[in-house]
Image (cartoon, coloured by chain):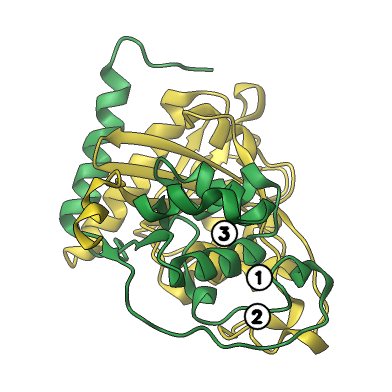
Chain colours: A green, B yellow
Amino acid sequence: MTQPGHGGQEPAEQVSAVRPFLLTEGRVLGEEASLPMETQLVATPDALQMVGQLAFERRAILEACRVPLSLAELAARLGLHLNVVRVLVGDLHNRNLLTVHIPRPGGSDLDVLQRVINGLRAIHTSPGSNDG
Amino acid sequence: MGDTQTLAPRPPQPVKMVVSGGFGVGKTTAIASVSEIEPLTTEAAITEVAAGVDDLSMTPRKTTTTVAMDFGCLTLDPTLKLYIFGTPGQDRFGFMWKDVTQGALGALVVVDSRRLDDCFPVVDYFERDGLPFAIAVNAFDGVLTHSLPAIRSALDVAAEVPVVAFDARSGVSVRESLIVVLEHALARARGY
């Protein structure tokens, strides 16, 4: 279903002067560039012990990811540029503090399509469905 | 420490759909109508030069543009969560479409029948990209200014591409339209 991301790919270490990437200590995107926005992130048990030793953004990411959270939600909640979050997530993953579940492409998966259709239909018929 | 990993909560399988269309056409309204959370905005910008280029590691000599992108989500069951991303439909934002559409189940192209040409760039993109899509004509105040056959003819989309009327403010209507996209995707995946 998901790939617990321990692929061991080393992100490229590069130095950049681009301002948004100050937070990332100058590193720009390597392997994380391809992380889809719906990628699910979960803090590892190790992370919960490490959290106090980390700087603001990294700490905020781990705290937000105590429950599974998508990359896009994380960026929105933290008010950070998506690609900055991608870099930080890559760092935390390499330090074994964050599990990265990369979604399978679902486009041609008949079973997934049918499940989504059924799920949407079930909302249709449920009495409590909100409808603005 | 390895087995403590299993204590981490297991995330649902994420799937995504795209809502696209011209400016002010009702994308954010449509997302808000079906999302279980208040739609969130993320800055999804990369670089202008990133169009068609996957490797952004050469960033320094390129100009960075920031584009706000809205999205919402819907938990369908404990193991399956649908994300709905809105993308700006203008040509100049084409550089970010691939980021959003890669791996998507399909797209709903929202159209204002008074400004049909606004949706041409995204329709062209989805046709080239092969992403299944349906056209949803937003009936502002319940009124379509052109009939659906006339709109289909003006858009010149393939015969199998669904063209439906919908109301972006209605959750039922938006979900129906998403189902139309998914059934089209399903039919296509089965080879029609």
Same chain for mark 3 and mark 1? The answer is yes
Disc 1 marks a residue whose amino acid type is Gly
Of mark 3 and mark 1, the one earlier in the sequence is: 1
A108 horizontally vs B55: left or right: left
Whether pointer 2 and pointer 1 mark residues with C-beta atoms closer than 8 Å, the reply is yes
Distance, label 3 to label 1, CA atoms, is: 19 Å
Res. B51 mark:
2
Secondary structure found at label 1 = helix
Of mark 2 and mark 1, the one earlier in the sequence is: 2
Question: Which residue is drawn at the image coordinates 72% and 48% (left, top)?
Answer: B115
Chain of the residue on which disc 2 is drawn: B
Disc 2 marks a residue whose amino acid type is Ala
Secondary structure found at label 2 = loop
Question: Which residue is drawn at the image coordinates 32% and 66% (left, top)?
Answer: A105
Mark 2: few, some, or many residues within 10 Å (few <14, many ≥20)? Answer: some
Res. B94 mark:
1
Chain of the residue on which disc 1 is drawn: B
Residue tagged 3: B155
Depth check, mark 3 against mark 1: the one in front is 1
Q: Position of residue A71 (x, y in %)?
A: 51, 55
